[in-house]
């Protein structure tokens, strides 16, 4: 059964609880501030990859730049986690970007409609008397094939299927305000710390140049604050570094959508099609 849970939140004694009077909840966030590092492990069968056993090869990944945009309760929903390949310091999108674009470990999960997730939750916590400082997020999903990519050995013909994925994190340093009952938002403030993971199972199905790479891979990434685009934010050209925004609300999603005018924000996460690196220069 397809199930989603999302709670507009307030904090009592450090515990996330549903906002008083909440009958319906929605939420969304976008941030390019985080990074990831870890391993991709190859397996002979899909079941071995799911069980994490009988590894035949292990590839170290990172540090890599991460872009995320997730929304729940909207039309359409979005589940986007990918390398921020469009940033550059050389005047053309992606050029010279070996942390978000070219290189081992580039990934792209791009689900327009939110059909791939089986559970999702998000909410604010750690109220200091003025602001909610923390934001926690969790999503589990799978069977995502459209536009899916994971560069294990190279960036050419790296398409396939995310049979499983899970992202779980808490970021800190935000300035979340309850702008109306149950509606909490932190706009324009980047996280200053993160704890969390990104794991899953990917089947590489497309590899014209190296067919021997077709197969099953499990990945285990730790989220961190290492981010090349952020460190070079004052020199980025042509695309400026995007804001980080987080929000939850008990309002019907359609109403909140109109009030906050968030339509089109996902366009800053540019879908990467064709051969990875085709428009980039390492």
Image: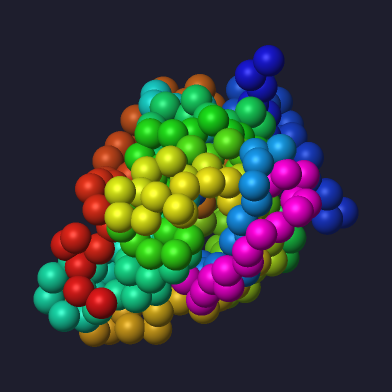
Res. 169 in view: no
Relative vertical location of residue 236 with respect to residue 79 in this rendering, above or below: below
Question: In this image, 166 relative to 18: left or right?
Answer: left
Relative vertical location of residue 166 with respect to residue 58 in this rendering, above or below: above
Question: In this image, 230 relative to 277: left or right?
Answer: right
57 in magenta: yes
Q: Position of residue 115 (x, y in %)?
A: 50, 25
Q: Position of residue 203 (x, y in %)?
A: 52, 42
Relative vertical location of residue 175 with respect to residue 250 in this rendering, above or below: below
Q: Residue furthest top?
A: 1
Q: Can you say which quadrant of the picture contains the C terminus?
A: bottom left
Question: In this image, 259 relative to 123: left or right?
Answer: left
User: Which residue: 63% across, 28% down?
Assistant: 118
Q: Can you say which quadrant of the picture contains the N terminus?
A: top right
Q: Position of residue 259 (x, y in %)?
A: 37, 34
Q: Position of residue 231 (x, y in %)?
A: 39, 83
Along the viewing direction, whichever of 40 and 35 lies nearer the viewer? 40
User: Which residue: 48% across, 61% down?
Assistant: 152
Q: Which residues are magenta?
A: 48-69
Relative vertical location of residue 170 with respect to residue 73 in this rendering, above or below: below
Q: Main secondary structure of the magenta part?
A: strand
Along the viewing direction, whichever of 217 and 87 lies nearer the viewer? 217
Along the viewing direction, whichever of 58 and 105 lies nearer the viewer? 58
81 in magenta: no
User: Which residue: 65% across, 41% down?
Assistant: 45
Question: In this image, 68 relative to 16: left or right?
Answer: left
Res. 145 in view: yes
């Amino acid at each position: 059964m397809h199930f989603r849970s999302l709670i507009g939140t307030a904090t009592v004694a450090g515990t996330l609880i549903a906002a008083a009077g909440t009958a319906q909840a929605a939420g969304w966030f976008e941030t390019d501030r985080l990074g990831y590092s870890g391993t991709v492990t190859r397996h002979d069968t899909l079941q071995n990859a799911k069980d994490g056993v009988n590894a035949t090869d292990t590839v170290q990944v990172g540090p890599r730049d991460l872009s995320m945009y997730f929304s729940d309760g909207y039309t359409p929903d979005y589940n986007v986690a990918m390398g921020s390949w469009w940033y550059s310091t050389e005047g053309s999108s992606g050029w010279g970007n070996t942390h978000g674009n070219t290189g081992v470990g580039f990934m792209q999960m791009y689900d327009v409609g939110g059909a791939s997730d089986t559970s999702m939750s998000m909410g604010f916590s750690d109220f200091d008397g003025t602001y909610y400082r923390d934001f926690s997020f969790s999503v589990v999903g799978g069977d995502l094939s459209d536009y899916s990519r994971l560069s294990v050995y190279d960036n050419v013909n790296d398409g396939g299927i995310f049979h499983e994925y899970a992202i779980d994190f808490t970021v800190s340093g935000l300035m979340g305000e309850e702008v109306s009952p149950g509606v909490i938002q932190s706009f324009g403030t980047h996280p200053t710390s993160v704890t969390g993971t990104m794991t899953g199972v990917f089947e590489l199905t497309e590899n014209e140049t190296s067919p021997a790479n077709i197969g099953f891979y499990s990945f285990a990434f730790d989220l961190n604050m290492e981010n090349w685009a952020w460190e070079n934010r004052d020199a980025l050209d042509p695309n400026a570094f995007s804001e980080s925004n987080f929000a939850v609300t008990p309002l019907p999603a359609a109403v909140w959508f109109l009030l906050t005018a968030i339509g089109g924000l996902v366009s800053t996460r540019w879908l990467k099609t064709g051969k990875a690196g085709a428009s980039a220069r390492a």
